[in-house]
Amino acid sequence: MSKTVLYMSMSVDGFIAGPNVAAGNGLGDKGQRLHEWLLPDADAEHRKGGHLAGVNRDVMDEALATGAVVVGRRTFELADGWGGDHHDGVPIFVLSRHQPDPKRQWPGVSYVSDITAAMRMAKDAAGDKDVLVHGARTAQLALAAGVLDELQIHLIPVLLGQGELLFEDMPPDHIELELLRAMDGPGVAHLRYHVRTAD
């Protein structure tokens, strides 16, 4: 059965980007450190993960086997929409209160204003594959709505000290997680958690 899974690289102190995130600096100052396990440089081969091996390769293959993507608009725009193709042309659902500029629309990209609707549409589109979720705010909204099934955290052994936190300004709700898997790869610990629903 399809699951919605947040995939996020994060420092030990909880940051997913450095300070000064902006167009052209999507990971913030020194934020690229969080993706060195995956993107040691910017050429096309490395963006596809062709250089990876072992555990890191397995984790990347798992992410690329997902059948749809749900992403916040800010994250989508900072990534320049991945050119309208996140991986293998899977449908992309962008969480946004506003429709895009008609000149910047791609086939396979839909804008949805409600997190529950976006997750439902993505699951329908993904069939029996998982849905890859991107973006801190999107993750927070999905957790609050009870529509995020799992968190895949790629924990990087660094303390950034400042930047953008994954769970900043969360409501004081108590959310229990169950560790499903912990794997060590070069430069990263891959932690996969199930989000427990309230009984």
Image (spheres, rainbow, N blue to C red):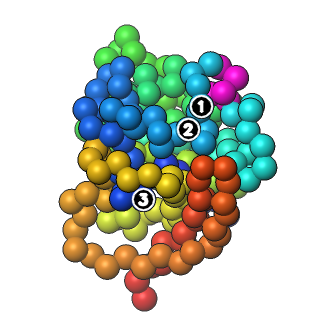
Type of amino acid under label 1: Pro
Element marked by disc 3: loop
- Mark 1 residue crowding within 10 angstroms, few (<14) / some (14–19) / many (20+): some
What are the residue bounds of the magenta stretch?
Answer: 44-48
In the image, residue 98 lies at what x, y percent?
Answer: 26, 32
Q: Nearer the viewer, residue 7 or 18?
A: 18
In the image, residue 190 lies at what x, y percent?
Answer: 60, 59
Q: Earlier in the sequence, mark 2 or mark 3?
A: 3
Q: Is residue 85 visible?
A: yes
In the image, residue 156 lies at what x, y percent?
Answer: 50, 52
Tell whether label 1 touches label 3 (CB within 8 Å).
no
Type of amino acid under label 3: Val
Element marked by disc 2: loop
In the image, residue 149 lies at what x, y percent?
Answer: 51, 65
Whether residue 87 is in magenta: the answer is: no
Residue at 73% x, 39% y: name it.
Answer: 52
Specify the label residue 12 is tagged with.
Answer: 3
Above or below, 118 against 181 in this view is above
Viewport quadrant of the N terminus: bottom right
- Mark 2 residue crowding within 10 angstroms, few (<14) / some (14–19) / many (20+): some
Residue underneath mark 2: 36
Does residue 33 appear to the left or right of 161 in the view shown?
A: right
Type of amino acid under label 2: Glu
Tell whether label 2 touches label 1 (CB within 8 Å).
yes
Does residue 4 appear to the left or right of 161 in the view shown?
A: right
**Magenta highlight: main SS:** helix
Above or below, 146 against 95 in this view is below
The alpha-carbon separation of the residues under discs 2 and 3 comes to 15 Å
Residue underneath mark 1: 40
Residue at 44% x, 52% y: name it.
Answer: 158
Above or below, 67 against 25 in this view is below
